[in-house]
Image (cartoon, rainbow, N blue to C red):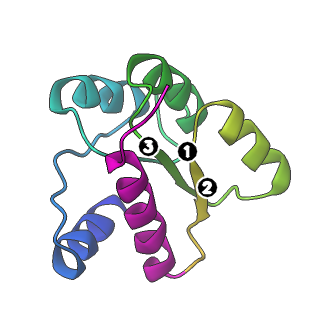
Amino acid sequence: IRHGLRSLVEQQTDWKVCGEAENGRDGIDQAKRLHPDLILLDQSMPVMTGLEAARELRRLMPRVPLLMFTMFKNPFFEREAHAAGISVVKSKSEDVQSLFMSMQELLESAARPHLG
């Protein structure tokens, strides 16, 4: 899914995918090095789960939006994800345009000045 999603993002948007990770730990390391505008996570990753990675990323990069793209979308999981710092949870069963719309909204929100 990761490689297919990268291709779709690059073909259907003007965004640049700056990195891909094999697992949660690698994702955190890449995020620290690459300073992305948005981070897309999956709950099912080796080494550490998406929620574990989100907690660490939120601590390291409090203003970078985190989006969880997963098969585990249900009200309980969404509460857990939001508590871990995930901004939006999207199901892999939703169409890709819905995912892109959420990504666009998060990028626009992150670009606005933050007061306080």
Q: Earlier in the sequence, mark 3 or mark 1?
A: 1
In the rendered image, which quarter contains the N terminus?
bottom left
Q: Is residue 39 left or right of residue 10?
A: right
Q: Nearer the viewer, mark 2 or mark 3?
A: 3
Could you tell me which residue is drawn at 35 percent across and 55 percent down? Answer: 107
Could you tell me which residue is drawn at 15 percent across and 59 percent down? Answer: 16
Relative to 22, does residue 13 appear above or below in the rendering?
below
Inspect the image, locate mark 3, and give the three-letter code of the amino acid beneath it.
Answer: Pro
Q: How many marks?
A: 3
Residue 26, x across and y down, in percent: 30, 28
Q: Which mark is residue 6?
A: none
Which residue does the numbered mark 2 point to in the structure image?
A: 89
Residue 85, x across and y down, in percent: 59, 33
Residue 12, x across and y down, in percent: 23, 81
SS for dot 2: strand
Asked if residue 62 can be seen in this view, the reply is yes
Relative to 13, does residue 84 appear above or below in the rendering?
above
Label pair 3/1, CB-CB below 8 angstroms:
no
Q: Does 91 appear in magenta?
A: no
Q: Is residue 89 left or right of residue 34?
A: right
Which residue does the numbered mark 1 point to in the structure image?
A: 44
Inspect the image, locate mark 2, and give the three-letter code of the amino acid beneath it.
Answer: Val
SS for dot 3: loop
The rendered magenta stretch, by its main secondary structure, is classed as helix
Relative to 99, does residue 65 appear above or below in the rendering?
above
Label pair 2/1, CB-CB below 8 angstroms:
no
Which residue does the numbered mark 3 point to in the structure image?
A: 65
Q: Nearer the viewer, mark 2 or mark 1?
A: 2
Front residue (pair 63, 114): 114
Q: Earlier in the sequence, mark 2 or mark 3?
A: 3
Q: Is residue 109 left or right of residue 91?
A: left
Q: Residues within 10 Å of mark 1 (few under 14, many from 20)?
A: some
